Image (tube, helix red, strand yellow):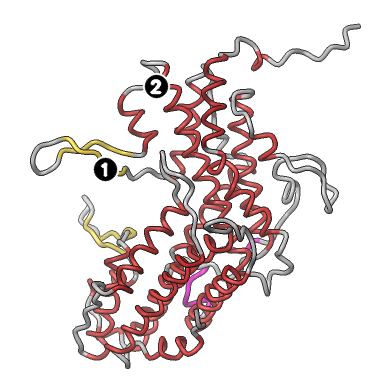
Amino acid sequence: MNNEMPKDPRLENLDEEIAEIIFQEFKRNIDLVAIHLRDARNMLYGVQDDNNDRALCKAVLLLGAAALESNLVYFSGAALRISENRTGLFFPGQIRYLRGIEEVVDENGKLVEKPARQSLSDRLQIVPTLLARTVQRTYQLKARSAAVQKLVRTIMRRDAIVHPRADRYITELGWWEAAEAIDSVELYLDSVRSALHPYLVGYFPVLYTIPGHDHHEVAVGHRTFGKKGPKRLPTTMGDSGLLEVGIGEWRDSILLILLALSHGCEGDSQGSMFTRAALIVLYAMLDAELSVMAQWRMAQQMDAFREAEVLFLNEWASGVGHDGELSLSEDHQSFKKRIKAIPAILSRCVEGKELNVDLGRQWGKDLIDGKALRDAVMHSEFDQPLARVSKQELIRSAKAVFAYFEELVAKSPVTFEYLSVVLKAKPTL
């Protein structure tokens, strides 16, 4: 009887040159691969219960989702490096997709490049598919698998936390959702690693957890495997209670900021896991407070608002379909437009005042710069190092958000009376 294990077909006909290219790319980009995921895991150990650790659970989920995006950037970079050494692997459009750009014609008729809008759900399949093609492999995302369903839920929760909407808000968030976020990212990355084995060097120590205090085996996604968690679904701000939403978002943000500023984590670096998470939650809080105030004022005196204003404040756009019927779709508004337009609409409708938010001062610049840094943390970019957030950058952004709120209270005190109360609990930074 032959007791030898059958040979893994993935280990046959290996391309040594490509293996070396990927290895060098891994060494250059180990931060993209490992740091967000490592930090999410470390923070999960601090979660004790659902009632008191909601802010920490948010932080875990957000960094887990950021790890997903940073690893997709790493996969894109590896595919592009290989294509530089093997001409003809990709068409120009595929190369642009991997770089996250698109080519358009400007008003002068010239071809220019600009960042492309790519859905995360598409990138989860397309990016590893293109990388697999470089080594004559295939990759298939099993959309109906439990692992992918966990990933879908994580992305949905991430979106609802980062940009709270009146009609899509997460009230209940605990250990289960945080653990599921880490598990889903691990399982996805392991599916890519398995499809390309043994080319994706470095992923075994990144993904596989050595048995520790909880006595689990070496396994990917072990935290929620085979278990049933609570079915806590998104709700609306109205159902959650507008006052509860506003106060809860403020409390979560301040708690994480103070934790980040007082914690010694990575004291010798330019940014820790807490500063990155705190910055994301800070801007989520700003978004939530604007939504809360808009819903509050519309509920009090809806007749004062015109239809276009109501649609804008609810983040909906209306249109007329081919059948002549009215239709509604989500309105994706820019950050700068929201922070200027929402206060202007509310002040005009509540107090009859024209309010112009002047972003030309230093706090306005800091507010916009902080938002750009937040975006860089959440959405890693090709050929860019992993974004860090120093304590000073976090302080500067927090002061800018507080100054923005103070500007609204000063210019329209009746409309933004709620903010004047909240600001009394502002910490000294």
**Which numbered circle lies on residue 114?**
1
Q: Position of residue 83 (x, y in %)?
A: 41, 22
Q: Front-most of 364 and 391? A: 391
Q: Secondary structure at mark 2?
A: helix
Figure quadrant of the N terminus: top right
In this figure, which residue is indicated by the disc labeled 2?
84
Residue 175 painted magenta? no
Q: Residue furthest left?
A: 108
Identity, as a three-letter code, of the amino acid under mark 1: Lys
Nearer to us in this view, 284 or 397:
397
Quarter residue 30 falls in: top right
- Mark 1 is surrounded, within 10 Å at the Cα level, by few (under 14), some (14 to 19) or many (20 or more) other residues, namely few
Mark 1 secondary-structure assignment: strand
Residue 37 shown left or right of residue 95 in the figure: right
Name the residue located 51 percent from the left edge and 23 percent from the top edge: 21
- What amino acid is at disc 2? Glu
Q: Earlier in the sequence, mark 2 or mark 1?
A: 2
Discs 2/1, front = 2
Q: Which mark is residue 418?
A: none
Which residues make up the magenta segment? 231-240
Q: Residue furthest top?
A: 1
Instruction: Determine the main secondary structure of the stretch shown in magenta.
Output: loop
